[in-house]
């Protein structure tokens, strides 16, 4: 159980409250589609891997460095073309921003960043972005549109140190509205450990270690299916965010 599980829970609660929800999988190591209950045979190609589309929109060959290409490719039609929908939640698979040296200024990178910016700044729906442990998909302009950066932590000093590093990266682009969710809480000692070492972080909520989440993952069903306790905790977290 981790951040992808929490993203799925947030999306489910918001959809049930009548919100238009767009969930974006921007972590190459996660599988948000399965967490949201999309069938295994329904798969989306990550935008960052659509070489022909990237070449068409940026007028440059994917994988190329330097040279000339469009820094503001058209992306406004992509959310309607490359999404799946289920139970009021639309899913888009973004792919990862490639890194190299001081950052990859390449067609794929420009495409993904432009699309993220469009989704956050120009669309009238709830956008939930499941990212890697960082802020690579965000720039200064898009950071201003982020209502809350949620960092998932587990009871342990290393997890809290990662949260501090993420906050430092977020501060570099002016993103300061950060909240924590404590995950895999085994009891009051774990909760007290995190609270005693949170510094000035705000905790949005805590999720207990729950074997049913593991079983749901093994069965390929959403973590919130037949789990009212999990949904109750997610409701509380959404209330604090909104």
Image: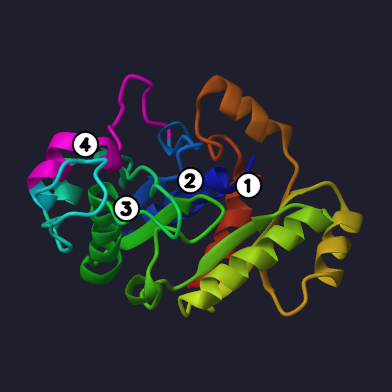
Q: Secondary structure at mark 4?
A: loop
Q: Quadrant of residue 158?
A: bottom right
Tell me the quarter of the image containing the N terminus. top right
Q: Secondary structure at mark 2?
A: helix
| Residue designated by label 4 | 50
Q: Vertical placement of 48 versus 129: above or below?
A: above
Q: Are marks 4 and 3 in contact (CB under 8 Å)?
A: no
Residue situated in front as seen by the camera: 179 or 108? 108
Left or right: 4 with respect to 43? right
Residue situated in front as seen by the camera: 40 or 174? 174
Tag in front: 1 or 2: 2
Residue 8: numbered disc: 2
Mark 1 and mark 3: span between their CA atoms?
Answer: 21 Å
Tag in front: 4 or 3: 4
Mark 4 and mark 3: span between their CA atoms?
Answer: 20 Å
Left or right: 161 with respect to 51? right
Q: Vertical placement of 138 versus 49: above or below?
A: below
Q: Are marks 1 and 3 in contact (CB under 8 Å)?
A: no
Residue 230: numbered disc: 1
| Residue designated by label 3 | 22
Task: Find the magenta span and give its range.
Answer: 37-56
């Amino acid at each position: 159980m981790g951040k992808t599980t929490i993203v799925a829970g947030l999306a489910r609660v918001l959809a049930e409250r009548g919100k238009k929800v767009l969930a974006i999988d921007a972590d190459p190591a996660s599988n948000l589609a399965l967490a949201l209950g999309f069938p295994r045979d329904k798969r989306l190609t990550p935008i960052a891997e659509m070489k022909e589309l990237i070449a068409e929109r940026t007028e440059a060959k994917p994988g190329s460095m330097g040279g000339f290409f469009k820094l503001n490719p058209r992306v406004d039609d992509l959310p309607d073309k490359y999404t799946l929908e289920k139970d009021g939640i639309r899913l888009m698979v973004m792919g990862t921003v490639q890194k190299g040296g001081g950052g990859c200024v390449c067609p794929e990178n420009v495409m993904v960043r432009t699309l993220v910016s469009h989704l956050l700044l120009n669309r009238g729906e709830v956008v939930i972005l499941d990212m890697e442990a960082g802020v690579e998909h965000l720039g200064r302009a898009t950071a201003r549109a982020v209502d809350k950066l949620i960092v998932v932590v587990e009871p342990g000093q290393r997890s809290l140190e990662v949260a501090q590093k993420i906050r430092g990266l977020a501060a570099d682009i002016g993103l300061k509205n950060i909240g924590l969710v404590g995950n895999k809480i085994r009891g009051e000692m774990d909760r007290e450990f995190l609270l005693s070492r949170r510094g000035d972080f705000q905790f949005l909520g805590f999720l207990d270690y729950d074997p049913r989440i593991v079983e749901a993952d093994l069965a390929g069903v959403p973590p919130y299916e037949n789990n009212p306790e999990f949904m109750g905790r997610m409701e509380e977290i959404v209330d604090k965010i909104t």
